[in-house]
């Protein structure tokens, strides 16, 4: 061990001045003397200094090549406290190596780069009456080699999107992956579209659904595991898809979803898990709080949208009344001012309507989308509890099997012994598998939560910036309109 370390200790030769001084406190702790020759262990300190000085003079006369060859055999002993520039030693300390889980997560995040953009456009009504449905164009632009073409366009109906969500959930939810929620069915909204009633509200419903579907698809595309799924690529590339069945189960008011929700609630009430991981305990509390706050904020934004639409409508009515009054006004300058006022109010009505749309599509829809995402996160936590329950159930069964084996051995029933031993071995494997599944889903949820938090901050930051820019633009136009009307109002004589 000393032979291998000796060359490294001679990288910096000590100066004579340093050798004559008393050893200073060593940042490395206690001083250590490394001896290369066992016969020199009894030498005194002055003798050791003389040996080192003699060697230093000899080394000056040698060539660099000869010196490098002779260094391992030259010194008799080395005092670690006399090494030059000891203050730089801490810089050479190796950083602690990350755990394998952290390395794997870092690699996944570093490779989480892609070029995949999905647009949902051109909603088209197909059929009439009760058999009518909407078809959307799904346009994919990508440079990923997994896809057959960099640009593809396919036609998909709403039930196809629901079917995709159903398949992805069945594959990844029990593994702890957060599957983005699909838009809910709306019997009332689709009924208006099918029968052509209230065209304005029907168009608003279709535009809203189109935006939700596009957000849903891009959230899947942003997930490194989900975007690699063959069903997702088939959805984006195949001309025809198998007809999705039982898609009504994904409706907010669907019977199947209701039954499943009741079943999950009963499971959570009857299954208790003593949480030993503080991280999961804190995250679940954080998710619950975030869910409540987002729901309150979404409710208030919905009220804001409604009030702004009402204000827009009222402003339009005021503009019409001002125009009618200007027609009946005999005073020329006042009539002209009222006409200008009516025109300004009409422009303000459009601005308020546009701002209401911004409130809805930028804020309200984002909040609703994240309320749905939080439900998906909660579903992952529930799957973790389910995995823990399965593990503990297997552990209890294993305990019973072992007790039964002991009873058979004590009773001397050798004919039942092989079967009992086989059952114990089988349940030991199940317990081990249950523990592995629980640890794996816990690790996956940690990664999913990290991605969820990163995307949440990024999405809300972008939404707030977009909303403020739109608001500032609206206010600037309002000021411009009123400044243009002010001279006309002052001209009334």
Image (spheres, rainbow, N blue to C red):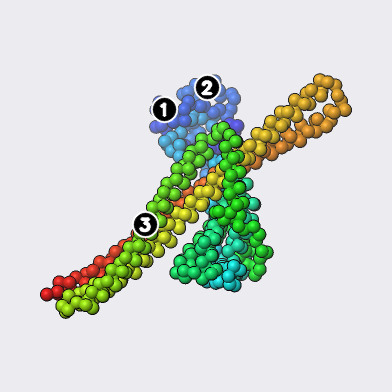
> Is residue 72 visible in this depiction of the protein?
no
Instruction: Tell me which numbered mark, 2 or 3, is placed earlier along the sequence.
Output: 2
Q: In the structure shown, which secondary structural element does the residue marked by tag 2 occupy?
A: loop
Q: CA distance from mark 1 to mark 2?
A: 23 Å
- How far apart in space, not on screen, are marks 2 and 3 (Cα)? 90 Å
Name the N-terminal-most of marks 3 and 1: 1
Other residues around mark 2 within 10 Å, as few (<14) / some (14–19) / many (≥20): few
At x 62%, y 37%, the residue is 388
For this orientation, the residue located farthest to the left is: 493
- Name which quarter of the figure residue 236 lies in: bottom right
Residue at the (48%, 35%) spot, across then down: 56
State the image coordinates of residue 482 (x, y, percent, origin top left): 23, 69
In the picture of the structure, the residue carrying the numbered disc 2 is: 43
* Residue at point 52%, 22% (across, down): 43
Mark 3, residues whose alpha carbon is within 10 Å: few (<14), some, or many (≥20)? some
Q: Which residue is mark 3?
A: 304
Q: Position of residue 329 (x, y in %)?
A: 19, 77
Image spot of residue 67 (x, y percent): 54, 41
Which label lies toward us, 2 or 3?
Answer: 3
User: Foreground: 80 or 248?
Assistant: 248
Disc number placed over residue 25 in the picture, else none: 1
């Amino acid at each position: 061990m000393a032979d291998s370390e000796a060359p490294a200790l001679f990288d910096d030769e000590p100066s004579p001045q340093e050798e004559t001084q008393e050893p200073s406190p060593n940042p490395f702790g206690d001083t250590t003397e490394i001896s290369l020759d066992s016969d020199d262990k009894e030498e005194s300190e002055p003798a050791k200094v003389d040996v080192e000085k003699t060697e230093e003079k000899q080394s000056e006369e040698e060539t660099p090549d000869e010196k490098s060859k002779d260094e391992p055999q030259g010194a008799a002993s080395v005092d670690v406290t006399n090494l030059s520039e000891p203050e730089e030693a801490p810089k050479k300390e190796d950083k602690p190596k990350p755990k394998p889980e952290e390395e794997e997560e870092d690699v996944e995040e570093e490779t989480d780069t892609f070029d995949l953009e999905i647009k949902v456009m051109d909603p088209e009504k197909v059929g009439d009456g009760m058999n009518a449905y909407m078809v959307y164009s799904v346009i994919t632009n990508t440079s990923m080699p997994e896809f057959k073409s960099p640009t593809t366009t396919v036609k998909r109906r709403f039930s196809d999107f629901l079917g995709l969500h159903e398949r992805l959930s069945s594959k990844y939810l029990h593994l702890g992956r957060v599957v983005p929620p699909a838009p809910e069915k709306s019997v009332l909204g689709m009924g208006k579209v099918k029968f052509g009633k209230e065209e304005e509200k029907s168009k608003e419903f279709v535009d809203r659904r189109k935006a939700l579907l596009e957000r849903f698809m891009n959230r899947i595309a942003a997930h490194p595991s989900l975007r690699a799924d063959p069903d997702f690529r088939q959805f984006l590339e195949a001309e025809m898809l198998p007809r999705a069945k039982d898609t009504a189960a994904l409706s907010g008011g669907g019977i199947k979803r209701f039954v499943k929700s009741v079943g999950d609630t009963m499971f959570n009430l009857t299954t208790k898990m003593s949480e030993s991981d503080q991280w999961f305990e804190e995250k679940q509390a954080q998710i619950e709080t975030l869910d409540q706050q987002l729901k309150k904020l979404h409710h208030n934004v919905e009220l804001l949208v409604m009030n702004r639409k009402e204000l827009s409508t009222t402003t339009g009515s005021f503009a019409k009344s001002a125009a009618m009054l200007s027609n009946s006004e005999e005073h020329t300058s006042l009539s002209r001012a009222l006409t200008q006022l009516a025109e300004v109010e009409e422009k303000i009505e459009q601005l308020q309507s546009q701002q209401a749309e911004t409130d809805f599509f930028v804020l309200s829809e984002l909040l609703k989308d994240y309320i749905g995402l939080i439900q998906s996160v909660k579903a992952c936590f529930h799957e973790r509890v389910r995995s823990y329950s399965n593990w503990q159930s297997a552990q209890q069964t294993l305990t019973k099997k072992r007790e039964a084996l002991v009873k058979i051995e004590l009773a001397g029933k050798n004919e039942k012994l092989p079967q009992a031993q086989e059952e114990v071995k089988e349940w030991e494997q199940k317990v081990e598998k249950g523990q592995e599944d629980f640890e794996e889903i816990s690790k996956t949820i940690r990664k999913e939560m990290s991605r969820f938090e990163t995307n949440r901050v990024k999405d809300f930051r972008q939404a707030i910036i977009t909303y403020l820019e739109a608001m500032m633009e609206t206010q600037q136009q309002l000021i411009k309109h009123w400044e243009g009307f002010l001279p006309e109002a002052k001209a009334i004589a």
